[in-house]
Image: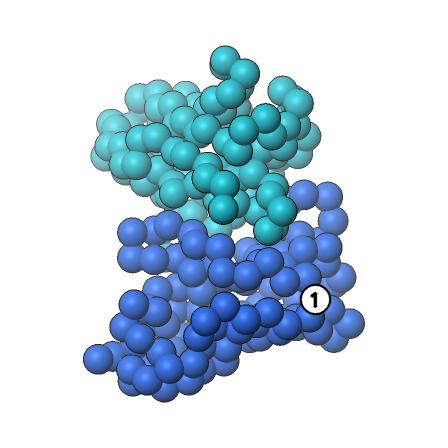
Chain colours: A blue, B cyan
């Protein structure tokens, strides 16, 4: 089946710093989403981005479907950005496959 | 964004007991999914449900699991005889215009 790899696995940032999270996938996909899992365990949908670039405030994402990767940019990080960021893809059908996540900690 | 609601938010149960996790999907949606996340691990697909039938299930979804749509709007995930390793966060999800919308999750603790 499709492989979804996220990097880095862990990231520590000083508040105000910028970062880039990467998601590589091994086959073509119909759907790609980025989620933020908060400390309470909730999965918050950040972007639905099967291709192209989107921005929402300090966050933006780019997916290059032909090269099978997606990037999530976090600018001017805040302590509330801490948590786990998951990339999730739908290769075909409707089942969503998650990556292992990037655990982000932003220090005040 | 439309909401998917799950209850309870946290359930503690004794090993061997049956548990029922509930979900209210985006209204009138025919597709429905359950996922599981063991603490510290990735989110894993359990089962997909379409028009009152299971359309796909993973190897995790063995005979102790079942899904139902008891009253036409709510969906349930039943675990018949819980084991310690069933302790996890369980999410339900619906497809939506912005991809997939996940519920807030039920944290199941088996003791």
**B44 or B26: which is nearer to us?**
B26
The residue at the point 49 percent across, 24 percent down is B75
Per the image, label 1 sits on a secondary structure element best described as loop
The residue at the point 50 percent across, 77 percent down is A73
Q: Position of residue B80 (x, y in %)?
A: 41, 21
**B96 or B9: which is nearer to us?**
B96
Using residue A41 as the reference point, say whether residue B71 is left or right of it. Answer: right
* Image quarter hosting the C terminus of chain B: top left
Query: Is A61 drawn above or below residue B43 in the view shown?
Result: below
**B8 or B107: which is nearer to us?**
B8
Query: Is B1 drawn above or below residue A37 in the view shown?
Result: above
Q: Which residue is mark 1?
A: A51
Residue A25 in view here: yes
Q: Position of residue A14 (x, y in %)?
A: 29, 85
Q: Position of residue A103 (x, y in %)?
A: 38, 69
Q: Dot 1 falls on which chain?
A: A
Using residue A106 as the reference point, say whether residue B68 is left or right of it. Answer: right
Q: Position of residue A85 (x, y in %)?
A: 45, 65
Question: How many marks overall?
Answer: 1
The residue at the point 25 percent across, 79 percent down is A107
Residue A1 in view here: no
The residue at the point 27 percent across, 36 percent down is B10
Which residue occupies the extreme top position in the image? B71
**B91 or B87: which is nearer to us?**
B91
Mark 1 crowdedness (10 Å alpha carbons): few <14, some 14-19, many ≥20: some
Quadrant of res B103? top left
Quadrant of res B94? top right
């Amino acid at each position: 089946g499709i492989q979804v790899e996220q990097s880095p696995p862990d990231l520590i940032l000083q508040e105000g710093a910028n970062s880039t999270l990467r998601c590589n996938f091994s086959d073509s996909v119909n759907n790609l989403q980025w989620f933020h899992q908060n400390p309470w365990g909730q999965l918050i949908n950040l972007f639905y981005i099967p291709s192209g670039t989107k921005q929402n405030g300090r966050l933006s994402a780019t997916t290059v479907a032909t090269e099978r990767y997606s990037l999530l940019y976090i600018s001017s990080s805040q302590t509330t950005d801490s948590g786990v960021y998951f990339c999730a893809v739908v290769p075909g059908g409707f089942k969503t496959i998650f990556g292992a996540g990037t655990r982000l900690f932003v220090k005040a | 964004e439309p909401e998917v609601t799950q209850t309870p938010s946290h359930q503690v149960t004794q090993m061997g007991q049956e548990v029922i996790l509930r979900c209210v999907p985006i209204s009138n949606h025919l597709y429905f999914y359950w996922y599981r996340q063991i603490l510290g691990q990735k989110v894993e697909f359990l089962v997909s449900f379409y028009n009152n039938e299971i359309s796909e299930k993973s190897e995790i979804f063995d005979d102790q699991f079942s899904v139902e749509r008891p009253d036409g709007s709510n969906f349930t995930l039943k675990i018949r005889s819980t084991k310690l390793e069933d302790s996890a966060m369980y999410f339900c999800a619906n497809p939506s215009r912005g991809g997939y919308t996940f519920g807030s999750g039920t944290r199941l603790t088996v003791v």
